[in-house]
Amino acid sequence: MSLFQNIIVIITLIIGAGFLSLSEIALAGARKIKLKLLSEAGDERATKVLKLQENSADFFAASQIGLNAVAILGGILGEAAFRPYLMGFVERFYSGPWAQTIGFMLSFTFVTSLFILFADLMPKRLAMIAPEKISIAVINPISIFIKICKPLAWVINAIANLIFRLLKINTTRDDNITFDDISAIVDAGAQAGVLQQQEHHFIENVFELEERTVPSSMTTRENVVYFTLKESEHSIRQKIAEYPYSKFLVCNEQIDQVIGYVDTKDILVKIMNNQSFIQLNESIIRNVLIIPDSLTLSELLDRFRATKEKLAVVINEYALVVGVITLSDIMITVMGDWVTPIDEDLQIIKRDENSWLIDGSTPIEDVKHALDIEEFPEWENYETIAGFIMYRLRKIPRPADYVEHEGFKFEVVDIDHYKIDQLLVTRLTEQLPANSAEEQDR
């Protein structure tokens, strides 16, 4: 064949190899979620791509047969076509015994570079840009090519399957979507500007319901306002006026003796009708949902949905009340500032770019979001930032005690009867001395 004919053949081989490379990456990288949406919209080609992905062995075998056959044939033809001309070019400058070898190496390098650039690298990069669109566009010709190569592909797949069985390798593709996968997609959407920062934060909080336990969002024991059975009408009226709650626990004599709860609406109806009540009774007191403190927020939502309740009392393993939680508390945890009352005391106050005042009862998850901290060590052992400090110090803290973590200094600034009331958190700009307070008094 003439040089022109060889060039035409090589260009044809490059186009064929490029098409196979493009199809291989596009069909492998096409996302099932988008393909399912296209299939549901009536695109039959998307349905074919999904079926091909489920049974991809024949396609990959056919693709490798085509790519390797084209590469070998292109190398043979290209080397034979270009070597005489490259040898003539080399002999203009060098006519020694290595001239033929140099000509061969130049022709081999030239043909290989053409196939790498136009039949491999560029098609694969193009396929990664829009894998779903390209996979749909190539599925029909690829299906024909697979049928042509099927006899040889069957033999190759049979040998490959036998080797996999001998090596005990599972070749089944796992297409299950995990929370980490969804979180990665959400993060990518936020970085691309598709999601606003507040929406990104909201979606992350929804996923965290599976991990966050009830104590991270409840009203703690010391902050629970309750009525006793013998409480006077004046005291009840005063508490209702002072605390803007819609529901109050009713206990016998102390908080650990929970009887039920009352809805202030029932009491206000009596007051509006100029009725007086001497004490709380069964007509007003409702049964309350009792839950263990080991439940996750997601499990509690299921309990609320099943019982139609919106208030639950949280007890520990010793049957002591550790707090109460409402449906509103869960919604505040999920939606944050969107539903938090404006006049509510802030648990995290930003003083400047590098310092924060944080309430000791602030849940660890909220601190992670506020300070952009990836993780706290052994977080399953505590729920709040105060718990983190005590866990790291391994002692009852005192003012000025501190620990360091992820480039931040967490310093105790206020203690209320052994309880960490407030922390000062500062971003470290330089390494602090090694003798930190967490190493003192051990």
Image: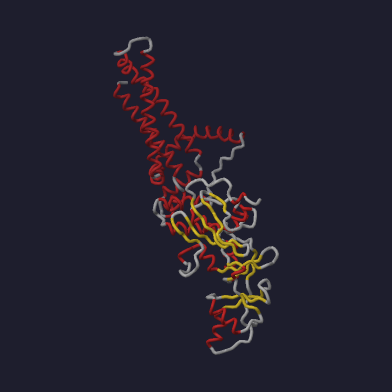
Residue farthest toward the top in the current orientation of the protein: 96
Is 14 in front, or is 414?
A: 414
Is 118 in front, or is 10?
A: 118
Q: Position of residue 232 (x, y in %)?
A: 63, 83
Does residue 327 sit above or below 32 in this rendering? below
Give the tally of numbered discs.
0
Image quarter where the N terminus lies is top left
- Answer left or right for 295 relative to 341: right
Residue at figure coordinates x 56%, y 32% from the top left? 159
Is 226 in front, or is 152?
A: 226
Is 243 in front, or is 14?
A: 243
Residue farthest toward the right in the current orientation of the protein: 318
Is residue 299 visible in the rendered image? The answer is: no
Q: Position of residue 387 (x, y in %)?
A: 60, 57
Hey, which quadrant is residue 228 in on the image? bottom right
Does residue 289 sit above or below 434 in this rendering? below
Q: How is the image coloured?
A: secondary structure
Q: Position of residue 194 (x, y in %)?
A: 40, 54
